[in-house]
Amino acid sequence: MPFDLAFVWAALIAFAVLAYVILDGFDLGIGILFPFFPEKHDRDQMMNSVAPVWDGNETWLVLGGGGLLAVFPLAYATILPALYAPLIAMLLGLIFRGVAFEYRWRTRRAERLWDAAFAGGSLVAGFSQGVALGALVQGIPVENRAYAGGWWDWLTPFSVATGIALVVGYSLLGATWLVMKTRGTLAARAADYARVAALLTVAGMGVFSLWTPWLKPLYLERWFGFPTAVFTVLVPLMVIACLYAIIRGLQQGREVQPFLGALGLFVLGYVGIGISFYPYIVPTSITIQDAAAPPESLAFLLVGAAVLVPIILIYTGYAYWVFRGKVDPEEGYH
């Protein structure tokens, strides 16, 4: 029973993190692309395209982080000290971005300042998330069930490269979202950026596919041992299919297809990370079962999650349904 509950919670937290990366990824991408659209009219449309949903998207981050603390306290107590710097930078970026989202519409004199805060906060948040992911993938030293590394262990060429790659990936999500939600020259320029970002994202996935297996013997075994090697063989084909869907969709003026193709790239990368990690929650140091809270706590918390998660899903789906379609350039949600 403890194994089953721990696995269920690990799957639930993994789903919450994926939902956050996908949903908040495109509106972080909007901010990252902000400097490439200097016209106020374009920026207004870009922000209006995510105004109804951006704060709801971050619900999944709270669920993932809060769930990790409550359900896998050992993992939380190990990961947090190892990644204090990038995680604090991420939170500060999200704060600046959220404040800028509200204040930008309240002033003319300081509008440029809040535009810079929105773009900078989005860039810092996206880069910090990538750095944290890279540091986690490369491994966290653990001794006696506690973090045994130093303050700067998270800062490596691999983690920095991961941060840059995630910024590029978020830019792809943001650009394809704009293609789907806007019209005219804004959508056309977003399509141009989406083509470049798609090629760079796939190139980055190729680099990390060659780099990651050599970080840990476990990764090498998972990527090239049976039966997980089947996924390793299929991934390049599926990545190429997603890239084709993006490029072809942009060429043919299909507005939804590029965004779905971009989501496919993120899902493939995320599944690959999950296969590399399992059954560890802190790679090669702490397993899901070792990190889990007592079975009674897992069962008690699962009852609450069984109620709240469907409510969040229904609310999120309803919000996207209500605000479906193109953004009116002359109107907004602010």
Image (tube, rainbow, N blue to C red):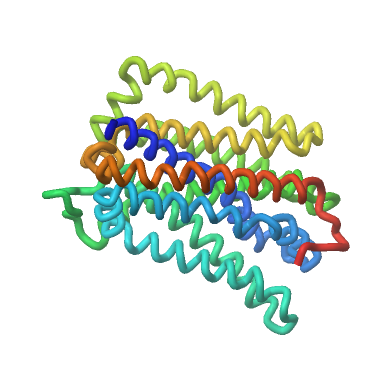
Splitting the image into 4 quarters, where does residue 197 fall?
top right
Q: Residue at x 66, y 28 (%)?
A: 244
Q: Is residue 171 above or below residue 43?
A: above
Splitting the image into 4 quarters, where does residue 195 fall?
top right
Q: Residue at x 72, y 81 (%)?
A: 107
Residue 205 drawn at (x, y percent): 48, 36
Residue 150 drawn at (x, y percent): 20, 59
Which quadrant is home to the C terminus? bottom right
Residue 66 drawn at (x, y percent): 40, 54
Looking at the picture, tell me which residue is in the foreground, 311 or 113: 311
Is residue 279 visible in this depiction of the protein?
A: yes
Q: Residue furthest bottom?
A: 109
Looking at the picture, tell me which residue is in the foreground, 240 or 12: 12
Q: Residue at x 32, y 37 (%)?
A: 6
Looking at the picture, tell me which residue is in the foreground, 334 or 217: 334
Splitting the image into 4 quarters, where does residue 19 fall?
top right
Which quadrant is home to the N terminus? top left
Q: Is residue 322 above or below residue 254?
A: below
Q: Is residue 65 left or right of residue 186?
A: left
Is residue 282 visible in this depiction of the protein?
A: no
Residue 92 drawn at (x, y percent): 47, 68
